[in-house]
Structures are given as structure tokens and as C-alpha cells.
Amino acid sequence: MNNAAIFSMPVAVVAAVRRRTRATEFVAIAVAAAIVAVLQCPCGAAAQDSVSVAATDGYFDVSRIDADTWAISEPQYWQKNNSFVIKGQIRTILFDTGSGTRDIRHMAGNVTRKPTTAMPSHVHYDHIGSIGSFDQVAMVDLPVNRERTADNRYTPSLSMSLWPFSSSFMVTEWWKPGEKIDIGGRVLEAVSIPGHSPDSIAVIDRARGYAFVGDFLYAGELYTFLPGADLTAYLESTKRLLADYPEVKLLLCGHGKPTMPREALVALQEALSAILEQRAAPERVWRLGGLIKKYPGQGFSILAW
Ligand SMILES: [Zn+2]
């Protein structure tokens, strides 16, 4: 609201607006303080293998994976996205920035006061919704990303983002595949895992046994029928994850339930092999206006042409 508008309003109305603004601010501050208190309270600690909601602002739910790792979920959004706060002693990586239905930055700021770098698991529109709210953005140095980048500004194509209105964003950091990135007492590395999309990546925390996998695997319908999806690449990526990262015990997933065990990767390898070897029996379902094959998996299913 600008000053001219305020001066043109009757004094009583202005006073009422100001009273309401103060009340709104007070409520917002109280909610933020409560969220911070819950997040920092050791009594809120959950067991390593369970994920329960520790705090909510009414839209985003925050769940504790461990003392330095949090899921920020959007249970009201139709795709039920999960983004992940990966805290180090120096800085934080926010793996995915949500659907953009609401700006995730304020909630990430409640979870960590460290400088935060956003990093997309891939650039489908529902994972880069609030990426423009972050000054620091990291991407993996892959040809598929570089070819859409000029002067460090990444511009998603329609076939990459699947949404005609996705904005471009600045990339401030490029991670080489397999490069060890120390965020302060915590070393991460990124790996290319094409399959769901050509630009899909996982971030691995070997010491904690975590793989943040975005849409590569979650407990729901896995999309392999969208532009850029590739079943053969999907299987190769799955085999590589299993072979190169024996430490990984927990998968942090982009939709639905935030975690799955390593065994789900083994089941994915079997399910993809069965499709490619034409051993799997699909049912036909309508999805996004097309008649798609739906293959069963253990704890998930795979949608393909
Ligand atoms: Zn997604």
C-alpha cells in the first residue's frame, strides 16, 4: 500500500487497517516463533526410521529426518511434493524448492539460519516453483543443463519444465558429477540419474547413508512417459546407484511419503528390467489425457507408453 492511497482513506479506516496489520504481524511472528521452538527442541526428536510432522504453518509440513535433515512437504498440493533441507555447519542445501503454490523460502528460513543454496533435483515445474526466491542456486555440470544456460542464467525449455510459464534463474554454482562438496562437517556429492527426466540428479550423503532422489523413486506412480523420460537410462541409473553407493540405506523422495528404504531401489531395478524384457503385465489407465501402461512394483508403480 502506498502513501497516497493511505492519505486518501478516512482516518478511521486507516487506523483499522493498521490495527489489523499489527494483529496479523503478531500472529505471524508467534507462529514463526512456535515453529522455530519446535524445530530446535530436542524433545521433538524422532527415531531415525520414522518421519512425523514436527511443525506446520498450515500449508507446509516440516518433518525431521535427523538433527540436520528435514523434509518440507506440501500435503495440500495435488502432487504432495517434498523438498529437503540438508544442513551443514557452514551452509544449507535446499534440495528442490517446491511447487511454488506458496513460497518455500520462509519455511526453509524457519528450519535453518545458515546461508541456503537451492538445488533442483530436475527442472520439472513442480520442483523449481520458488527457485527465483533464492540468491544462491547450484546445478550439476551436465551438458543437458549447460546447453540451456547463457551467462549463468538457466532458461528451462517447455519440454524440460513441462510448464510454459517457468521462469529462468541464475546459477551461482556448478557441481561436477561425483565432486565432493563440503558444506561444513557434511560432505555431499551429486550424481546424474537420467530416466524420469534427462536432467535428474541425486545428491548423496555417504556418511549418513542418504540418497536424495527427487522423482527418480517414491511410493506412488513413477512417470516414465513424459518428454525426456527413458526406461533404458532409468534402469542403468538404478544399477549405478546400487553399485556405486553401497552406503546408501535411505532414499529421500520427491513426492508422498518422504522416505523409502534401499530395498525399494532393488525393487525398482527388478521392475524396470521386467518391463524392458517384456516380462511384466501392465494394466491400461488414463493419465494426463492419455491411455498409459501401468506396471506394478513393490511399493510403487511405473507408468509408461
Ligand atoms: Zn515431481
Image (tube, helix red, strand yellow):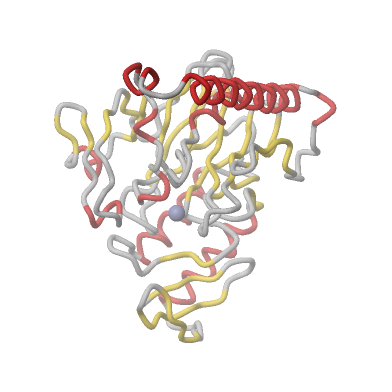
Asked whether, in this view, residue 256 is left or right of residue 177, the answer is right
Q: Residue at x 36, y 35 (%)?
A: 177
Observer-nearest of 55 and 175: 55
- Name which residue lies at 45% across and 51% down: 240
Image-quadrant location for residue 149: top left
Q: Is residue 97 above or below residue 261?
A: above
The quarter of the picture where the C terminus appears is bottom left
Left or right: 145, with 182 as reference point: left
Question: Which residue shows up at 50% across the image and 82% down it?
Answer: 280
Residue 29 or 131: which is nearer the viewer?
A: 29
- Which quarter of the frame holds ligand 1? bottom left
Residue 39 placement (x, y as % from top left) = 71, 27
Image height of 261 relative to 83, above or below: below
Give the answer, above or below, for where 199 lies relative to 1: below
- The foreground one among 122 and 279 is 122
Position of residue 296 measured from the top left corner of the image (x, y, whole percent)? 56, 76
Q: 118 or 243: nearer the eye?
A: 118
Question: What x and y, as percent, mark residue 203?
Answer: 48, 38
Question: How far from the left and from the top, in percent, is residue 151?
Answer: 15, 26
**Point 81% across, 24% down: residue:** 42
Residue at the extreme left of the image, as rendered: 150
Residue 208, quarter of picture: top right
Residue 146 is left or right of residue 207, and the answer is left
Could you tell me how many numbered marks the image carries? 0
Which quarter of the image is occupied by the N terminus?
A: top left
Q: Residue furthest right?
A: 43
